[in-house]
Image (spheres, helix red, strand yellow):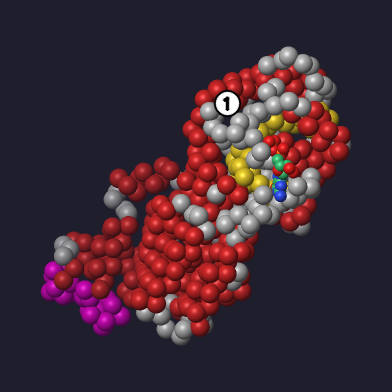
Amino acid sequence: MFESLQERLSGVFDRLTRRGALSEEDVSVALREVRVALLEADVALPVVKDFVAAVKEKAVGQEVLRSVTPGQQVVKIVHDELVAMLGGVAEDEGAQAGQPFELRGLGLNLNVTPPAPILMVGLQGSGKTTTTAKIAKRLAEREKKKVLMASLDVRRPAAQEQLALLGIQAGIATLPIVPGETPVKIAKRALQTGALEGYDVVMLDTAGRLAIDEALMAEVAAVRDATKPSETLLVADAMTGQDAVNVATAFKDKVGLSGIVLTRVDGDARGGAALSMRAVTGCPIKLLGTGEQIDKLETFHADRIAGRILGMGDVVSLVEKAAETIEQDEAEKLAKKMQSGKFDLDDLASQLKQLLKMGGLSGLMGMLPGVGKIKNQMKDAKIDDSMIKRQLAILSSMTKEERRRPEIIKASRKVRISKGAGATVQEVNKLMKQHQEAARMMKQVKKMGKKGMMRHGLP
Ligand code: GDP
């Protein structure tokens, strides 16, 4: 999967990264090619449109970092947007525990009173039964779970026997077959057996159909209601492209899904399904089926896939490093300022700009846990991003000299500044006062010295 898309995109970006300076025209041409490449990979049109618009907006507004070319920076923006389109980067527990990628769990929610029911749904031939056995085996081997599998497919001849056979091959228990039972009855019996015999997970392999139909949806919904699954996974064939996306949308609306398993990604699917799935359905792709054998199952990682599509991992990490250096430079500059005890209005302006860049006050506050109340108070006091922008307007209406030596700003200058910024003299006064406070704090920081700062809990 992704081979031809990768080839096309790497051509576009090779050309782009080799240029020293980029014009808006260069970016537009490159994005036009990206658009065509994505459409040819069978990505849904609205998804392509949103993607290109997001990249364009970010590329145009972005400051150019030192030590990388604008072209390289565009690659990084495209990469980040790809990751976002694929569902973003999730922090998984294995990563935090420093476990090697291959040994990490599947990231499925099994956090319920055991046995945790996992409902497998999808069309016939999508790879549902195979995937059920793959997941069961992985949970048993890597996560040391005791897993029971049950086939609820009473329509397709020998479907239950197929799962029983896979169970024997994989060393996973299957629910004994009782002829004549309805899917809901089998599901209930599976959960009862699971509870009685101490299973951690019960995997329910539902019947598929050749296409979406009402009877299928009603049957799956009835099983869902009877079992309250902790995961409802749709198995979808990547080779079917946009159809897979439509199937996912139908299942999501009628049954509800907690995740998607994309199978046959080892085939020559163009990748469109993988790329549009998340954006269209809002459901995360959790796992990938990468072959017929029972161990061919991979956890889905948006950044890995994006890396594979772009094939430009080195450029991406280069730009990340450059961005980190800039942040460090700014932090060091501020630290030096604090140590010198000086803090003029230019410093205030650059601080406010930095604040806006980081998503403004609301963005910053959003990152802190438990600040809902403070946020409301801020709203009441009208402390928001538009206020920061007003303050920046006031600061830019001052002369360089005024910003460097705020003490020269007397009444007549205040009137001029306020008029230039479309603000009131009171607003100018308020800003000056705010600056004095900040400058006073800087002096204190200087007095305290490094040790004192630590004792007072300042950074
Ligand atoms: P179901 O009807 O949805 O239960 O589909 P099955 O599990 O019976 O699978 C149908 C066919 O697809 C079988 O021949 C599987 O071996 C094959 N299959 C399943 N998953 C994959 C995969 O990830 N890659 C490949 N190449 N084949 C797969």
Q: Position of residue 400 (x, y in %)?
A: 27, 82
Residue 414 in the figure: left or right of residue 205: left
User: Dividing the image into 4 quarters, which one contains the C terminus?
Assistant: bottom right
Q: Position of residue 234 (x, y in %)?
A: 61, 38
Q: Who's the residue at 55% across and 26% down the image?
A: 217
Observer-nearest of 53 and 271: 271
Q: Does residue 181 show up?
A: yes
The answer to which quarter of the image holds residue 160 is top right
Placement of 49 over or under 230, stated as above or below: below
**Relative vertical location of residue 117 with respect to residue 273 in this rendering, above or below:** above
* Residue shown at the point (22%, 76%) measured from the top left: 398
Per the rendered image, the range of residues in magenta is 397-419
Image quadrant, ligand 1? top right
Q: Quadrant of the N terminus?
A: bottom right
- Secondary structure predominantly adopted by residues drawn in magenta: helix
Q: Quadrant of residue 423?
A: bottom left
Q: Is residue 143 left or right of residue 22?
A: right
Crowding at dot 1, Cα within 10 Å, few <14 / some 14-19 / many 20+, comes out as some
Q: Position of residue 167 (x, y in %)?
A: 83, 34
The image quarter containing residue 29 is: bottom left
Secondary structure of the residue carrying tag 1 is helix
